[in-house]
Image (spheres, rainbow, N blue to C red):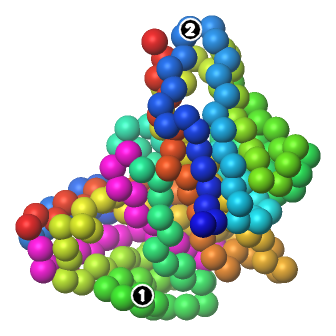
Amino acid sequence: SQQGEEDPQALSIQEGENATMNCSYKTSINNLQWYRQNSGRGLVHLILIRSNEREKHSGRLRVTLDTSKKSSSLLITASRAADTASYFCATAPKPYTDKLIFGTGTRLQVFP
Amino acid sequence: DGGITQSPKYLFRKEGQNVTLSCEQNLNHDAMYWYRQDPGQGLRLIYYSQIVNDFQKGDIAEGYSVSREKKESFPLTVTSAQKNPTAFYLCASSSLGLTRVYSEGYTFGSGTRLTVV
């Protein structure tokens, strides 16, 4: 079952611009995670935000979480061509489950 | 270097043939997972395992089988019962915290692309 839905499905920007991707989910969660996937490769874990956190930063990444709206956003600041990839949110639903549920992803294209 | 290794990178299956995808990790992670990814789509869970000799079905287990005889290894067999096996298969692993709530994310392998010929 797909819990998360990313929006937009695709995003094209110029280098130096900021990129914002959104994720909506359906059920209560323990935490929400964001992953990056370069074309034809595995996923790389970017950041995890717990259900009792509202915002988290890691380098050029900023993640927010609004549990009342069941939504999260990922902001990449000062984007680079190397940020070109697909980005997925994944949720760890409550009550405790031992598996993540991934969304459908946002394809980000950063033009030099 | 610690990591998770999938092999082969590319695999071709004939109709009616079973094939096995390998997944090995040296991260000492307890849990391992198999996901299927179709073009332009998200990941769908096939099987997962938290402990040796135990595993659970995910959302799309039909036509697949797994084993977990060693902590480091979690091979996936795509059987002839899987009618549409062409896809990108991803293996992942994670550690399990004392409270059994994840404190870190999954580590993924680089994937195996399976094509039916």
Q: Position of residue B1 (x, y in %)?
A: 60, 66
Disc 1 marks which amino acid? Answer: Ser
In 3D space, how far apart are the residues under numbered discs 2 and 1 (Cα atoms)?
A: 47 Å
Disc 2 marks which amino acid? Answer: Glu
Q: Position of residue A5 (x, y in %)?
A: 42, 59
Q: Position of residue B75 (x, y in %)?
A: 72, 38
Q: Helix or strand or loop: what does disc 2 sit on?
A: loop
**Which residue lies at the image location 63% right of the left edge and 8% below the top edge?**
B16
Using the rendered view, name the quadrant where residue A23 is placed. Answer: bottom left
Q: Which residues are magenta?
A: A15-40
**Residue designated by label 1:** A58
Quadrant in which the C terminus of chain A is drawn: bottom left
Using the rendered view, name the quadrant where residue B69 is placed. Answer: top right
In the rendered image, residues at marks 2 and 1 fall on the same chain: no
Viewer-proximal residue among A54 and A110: A110
**Residue designated by label 2:** B15
- Reply yes or no: does residue A96 show up in magenta: no
